[in-house]
Image (spheres, rainbow, N blue to C red):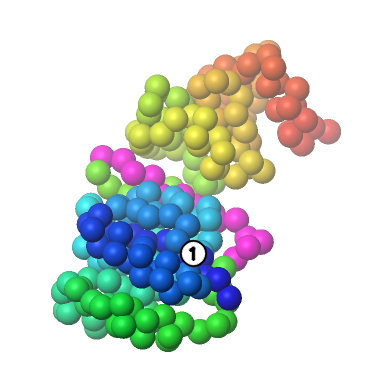
Amino acid sequence: MMLRCVIVEDLSVAAEYLSKCCEKAGNIQVTAKFSNVADALSYLNENPVDLIFLDVEMPEATGFDLLDQLAYLPKVILTTSKPEYAYPAFEYKVVDFLKKPYTYQRFSEAIAKLSTDSPSIPTQTSPDHIFIKSDGKLIRLNLTDILFIESMGDYVKFVTADKKFISHHTIKNLEEKVPKQQFIRVHRSYIVNIARIDDIRENFIFIQGNEIPVSKSQKPEILKRLNIL
């Protein structure tokens, strides 16, 4: 059975060694490698995997932060140079703890502990929240709280009822990531939460006093998505 995995490791040398170990094992496919928690979290919540090789000390957030924020829990093998992380690691029910530097033989022993049972991955349930990177922090946003998303070039602004968050994304990229049943792009610069629309007047949508332009090409699709009696 081929296991899909990701490597979350900020040291490129360590990530490359681990990747070669996986290749040598023959039954582990590395689908992606990440050097920070934010990028790994974004990928994992959209692309469920069987296994994560996870370093603890990462830039801006720890490996434990990633496990706290995942929408599901795959198998985890922790990789770190500090043995003091062993106890909290097993509180997260990790499969094994690889203390750097480790040999291929030690890697093989960790792999042997993996169960053949499939991880508990919610394939039918969409997440009810996202995490965005803003002001150097990972911030949780409940999807129902997002009123709309506005493009600001290479950045976007997430607008809720009482706050605004700036994050490094493009509107096109986000259009592919937010749940399509809940959000719709209404203009080249705006994605709105359909459930938060108050009214539509001519070529504008109004959400809690915010006036949002609607592209003529998008208006038929918007009207089709609304519950019009």
The x and y percentages for residue 2 are: 55, 71
- Residue 203 lies in what quarter of the image? top right
- Residue 163 lies in what quarter of the image? top left
Taking the view exactly as shown, the residue that stands out farthest to the right is: 229
Tell me if I can see residue 85 in this picture: no
Count of numbered circles in the view: 1
Write the residue at 37% across / 81% down.
Answer: 108
Horizontal side of 53 relative to 142 (left or right) equals: left
Q: Quadrant of the C terminus?
A: top right
The x and y percentages for residue 41 are: 41, 55
Instruction: State whether residue 109 is above or below residue 179.
Output: below
Horizontal side of 100 relative to 179 (left or right) equals: left
Q: Nearer the viewer, residue 102 or 135?
A: 102
Write the residue at 38% across / 45% down.
Answer: 132
The x and y percentages for residue 47 are: 53, 56
Q: Residues within 10 Å of mark 1 (few under 14, many from 20)?
A: some
Q: Nearer the viewer, residue 24 or 99?
A: 24
Instruction: State whether residue 210 is above or below residue 20.
Output: above
Please say whether residue 97 is one of the residues in the magenta stretch: no
Q: Which residues are magenta?
A: 122-135
The x and y percentages for residue 178 are: 55, 42
Residue behind mark 1:
29
Instruction: State whether residue 51 is above or below residue 131.
Output: below
Horizontal side of 28 relative to 1 (left or right) equals: left
Instruction: State whether residue 188 is above or below residue 20.
Output: above
Q: Quadrant of the N terminus?
A: bottom right
Taking the view exactly as shown, the residue that stands out farthest to the front is: 24
Tell me if I can see residue 51 in this picture: yes
Write the residue at 63% across / 16% down.
Answer: 215
The disc labelled 1 sits on which kind of residue? Answer: Gln
Write the residue at 38% across / 55% down.
Answer: 33
